[in-house]
Amino acid sequence: MAATRRITAGTVVTAVCAVSLAGCGIGADGSGRQSPGAGKAKPAPGPQGAVRLIGDGSTAYTGAQPHLPEPERLKPGEKPPQFVVFSWDGAGEDSQKLFSHFRTVAKENNATMTYFLSGVYMLPEEKRDLYRPPQHSPGRSDIGFNDAEGIAATVEQLRLAWLEGNEIGTHFNGHFCGPDGGVGEWSVAEWKDEIAQAKSFVKAWKTHTGMKNEAPLPFDYDKELIGARTPCLEGRENFTKAASELGFRYDTSGVNNQVWPQKERGLWDLSLQLVPFPGHSFEQLAMDYNFMVNQSGTATQGDPAKHGLWGDQMRDGLLAGFRRAYEGNRAPLIIGNHFESWNGGTYMRAVEETVEAVCTEPEVRCVSFRQLADWLDAQDPRTLEKLRTLKVGESPAQGWESFLSAAPAPAPKGVPGAPAAKG
């Protein structure tokens, strides 16, 4: 998995709030802008009441997150829904405006998603030395930093995304991969330090940018942050140890088949999954970068004549993985992406077409990792254990009603304990 690019800010309309921190609130549309003719702003209500600023006002407690469904336990014999999770590594808004675009795509298709924010996207270039990466000199980052315009644009998208029911996770900070200080070499203590820094950049973006009058992010990031994906899927062993000790609820940094998840170290293992790769005998990880590497190598802009084919391969692979689960074991489908225009943006098209094709199907729920973890936690552990016995693409031989029935299955006639035959 490649490092996400450094953000280049596009044109944004800055979200302005009151002239003092005490007056900062969230506008009626969630954007942080004042209503026309509003005059001096009053503390606007959050989802469930008054805004309570946290720290320097970069974040705020505004009540429970809106648009989160209440998880329900499966009834005996009930077929599980088909969950699909679309997630984004290094989420930020730049001149491509892919963050805002996929927010719209999600809303139009009854979907919510998970956005893994890179902490350094909330830190301006001139303050880069505030970042002290493990095993690297201060101010080092393999994906750069941001500028005021890019931070304002990213903050606006994060705010709106959360208010729409999406999840804000973390992709940590400097995105160091490989040997010589890569995340795969970090200790548990170094992971904890990296996580603390990622939180700090989100919780103090106003101080670091000087944008004191902007509206806050409408959540407490210490409570909002419950999961992550590590850079390049490296360092998972020590990261999950740190995450477990810090109270995280899931990790999605591994590679797995399309089977029902289980917990490791108290975390739900919601790893990326292998799906069919059209035209190939092997399966492919359900992530844009991995399709790209197996199509154009490390060249992010390969043969333009093949862009259409490559995008179709990713879309059709994701759809094949979806269909295999939907008609089989109903295991959640986990998909990862980057806000990138690799190979002419063909993978963005593939993801968008996949969202449009699957999220409106009956019994399908396109959700965030948080929502999936909530649902899993609400289930009878015995039900999940039974679901985990199903292999990739395997549906219950006797149907879902029998498979997940609360009562034991009747013994076949003619075996000990079976009812006597009537003659």
Image (tube, rainbow, N blue to C red):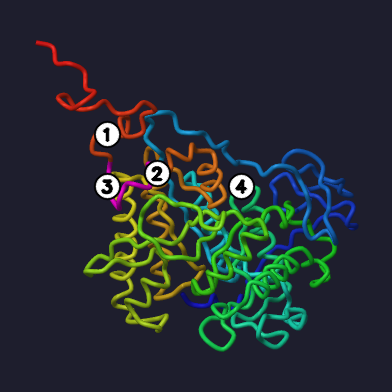
Which three-letter amino acid code belongs to the residue tagged 1? Answer: Gly
**Front tag of 1 and 4:** 1
Q: CA distance from mark 3 to mark 1?
A: 11 Å
Mark 3 surroundings within 10 Å by alpha-carbon count, few (fewer than 14), some (14 through 19), many (20 or more): some
Single out the residue that lies furthest toward the left: 423
Name the main secondary structure of what is drawn in magenta. loop
Query: Left or right: where does residue 127 sit relative to residue 398?
Result: right
Q: Which residues are magenta?
A: 385-395
Task: Check residue 85 for magenta coloring.
Answer: no
- Mark 2 or mark 3, earlier in chain: 2
Q: CA distance from mark 4 to mark 3?
A: 34 Å
Measured as percent of width and height from the top left, residue 15 is found at: 74, 59
- Mark 4 or mark 3, earlier in chain: 4
Measured as percent of width and height from the top left, residue 287 is found at: 42, 66
Query: Left or right: where does residue 103 sit relative to residue 59?
Result: left
**Front tag of 2 and 3:** 3
- Which image quarter: residue 404? top left
Name the disc covering residue 394, or none.
3
Measured as percent of width and height from the top left, residue 113 is found at: 53, 53
Which three-letter amino acid code belongs to the residue tagged 2? Answer: Gln
Q: In the structure shown, which secondary structural element does the residue marked by tag 4 occupy? A: loop
- Residue to which mark 2 is pinned: 82
**Front tag of 1 and 2:** 1
- Which image quarter: residue 186? bottom right
Q: In the structure shown, which secondary structural element does the residue marked by tag 1 occupy? A: loop
- Residue to which mark 4 is pinned: 164
Name the disc covering residue 399, or none.
1
Which three-letter amino acid code belongs to the residue tagged 3? Answer: Glu
